[in-house]
Image (cartoon, rainbow, N blue to C red):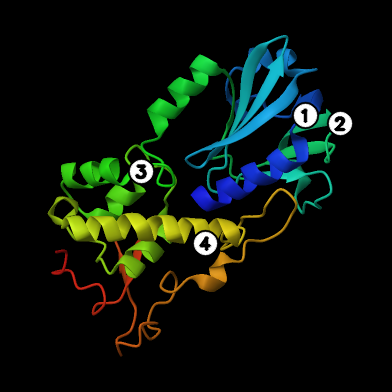
């Protein structure tokens, strides 16, 4: 956590609140929370928010000043949050960056990250391009079916790790991989390159359906995720297999959901996701 839907929710709320707002101050409490570009911090004072983008699980706030463009890119990591000033924080010592604005709907955005697995990066356009190219593969919400098919068929190995490999498919983590594979009727360990064209198309459509539904619900607040306005995601209520070990399959096949622990826990129905069915 968080994954693509949560990052999209964060980007959307910041976009609504801060497009056109001017940055008046940027306080950094820990220098090591900025992975790259700390020396450029003074440039951002007086810059205006023009866009807010999502790249994989990261959020990039675009600033414009004197016809130049720079970005503040936030890695949400496992526990990173971007929060508005109106949200009460239980442990304020974990607020490592404060960005103050004028002319927006919100006066401040805070970067809160107790475990500090994520970082901020202050980047120009070339830096952002390198950041995205190095970290992320295709975006499942914008990639074409043809490109998705070529990706799946070109990769040997198990399907679930491929879906979660950020440099192949950006933004899908363990929670949504489990939900997508169940709805697509595919076992987590089926060989990706053996899938039939029909199975790949089904996987493509289900992936988009699950991610769009999760975004509409504000994401999944399983442990630590809150949107910038402090609200929790409601998609957890729609999970059908994740965390449902030993519960009856929602397809009413009579079997119970099983859990296999490998790199990450996989939840699946042994009947509806038969490992021998991929054609």
- Mark 4: which secondary structure? helix
- Label 1 Cα crowd, 10 Å radius (few <14 / some 14-19 / many 20+): many
Q: CA–CA distance between discs 3 and 2?
A: 37 Å
Q: Which residue is mark 1?
A: 20
Q: Which residue is mark 2?
A: 103
Asked whether the residues under the numbered discs 2 and 1 touch, taking CB atoms below 8 Å apart as contact, a structural biologist would say: yes
Q: Nearer the viewer, mark 3 or mark 2?
A: 2
Image: 28 above or below 136: above
Q: Which residue is mark 4?
A: 213
Label located before the other in sequence (3 or 1): 1
Residue 8 image point, x, y percent: 57, 46
- Mark 3: which secondary structure? loop
- Mark 2: which secondary structure? loop
Q: CA–CA distance between discs 2 and 1?
A: 7 Å
Q: Is residue 221 left or right of residue 208?
A: right
Q: CA–CA distance between discs 3 and 1?
A: 32 Å
Q: Nearer the viewer, mark 4 or mark 3?
A: 4
Q: Is residue 188 left or right of residue 166?
A: left
The answer to whether residue 264 shows anywhere in this view is no
Judging depth in this view, the residue of 236 and 264 nearest the camera is 236
Label located before the other in sequence (4 or 3): 3
Label located before the other in sequence (1 or 4): 1
Q: Which residue is mark 3?
A: 169
Instruction: Say which quadrant the C terminus sits in.
Output: bottom left
């Amino acid at each position: 956590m968080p994954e693509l839907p949560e990052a999209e929710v964060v980007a959307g709320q910041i976009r609504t609140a801060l497009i056109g707002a001017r940055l008046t101050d940027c306080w950094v409490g820990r220098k090591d929370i900025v992975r790259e570009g700390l020396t450029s911090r003074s440039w951002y004072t007086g810059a205006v928010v023009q866009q807010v983008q999502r790249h994989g699980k990261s959020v990039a706030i675009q600033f414009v000043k004197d016809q130049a463009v720079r970005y503040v890119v936030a890695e949400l990591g496992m526990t990173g949050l971007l929060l508005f000033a109106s949200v009460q924080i239980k442990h304020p010592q974990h607020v490592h960056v404060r960005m103050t604005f004028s002319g927006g709907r919100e006066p401040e955005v805070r970067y809160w990250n107790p475990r500090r697995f994520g970082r901020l990066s202050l980047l120009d356009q070339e830096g952002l391009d390198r950041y995205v190219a190095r970290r992320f593969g295709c975006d499942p919400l914008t990639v074409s079916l043809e490109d998705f098919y070529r990706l799946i068929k070109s990769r040997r190995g198990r399907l679930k790790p491929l879906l979660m490999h950020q440099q192949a498919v950006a933004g899908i983590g363990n929670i949504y991989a489990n939900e997508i594979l169940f709805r697509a009727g595919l076992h987590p360990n089926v060989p990706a390159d053996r899938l039939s064209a029909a199975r790949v198309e089904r996987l493509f459509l289900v992936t988009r359906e699950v991610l769009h539904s999760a975004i509409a619900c504000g994401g999944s607040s399983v442990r630590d995720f809150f949107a910038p306005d402090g609200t929790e995601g409601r998609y957890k209520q729609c999970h059908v297999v994740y965390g449902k070990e030993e519960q009856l399959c929602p397809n009413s096949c009579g079997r119970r959901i099983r859990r296999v622990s490998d790199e990450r826990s996989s939840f699946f129905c042994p009947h509806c996701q038969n490992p021998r069915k991929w054609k």
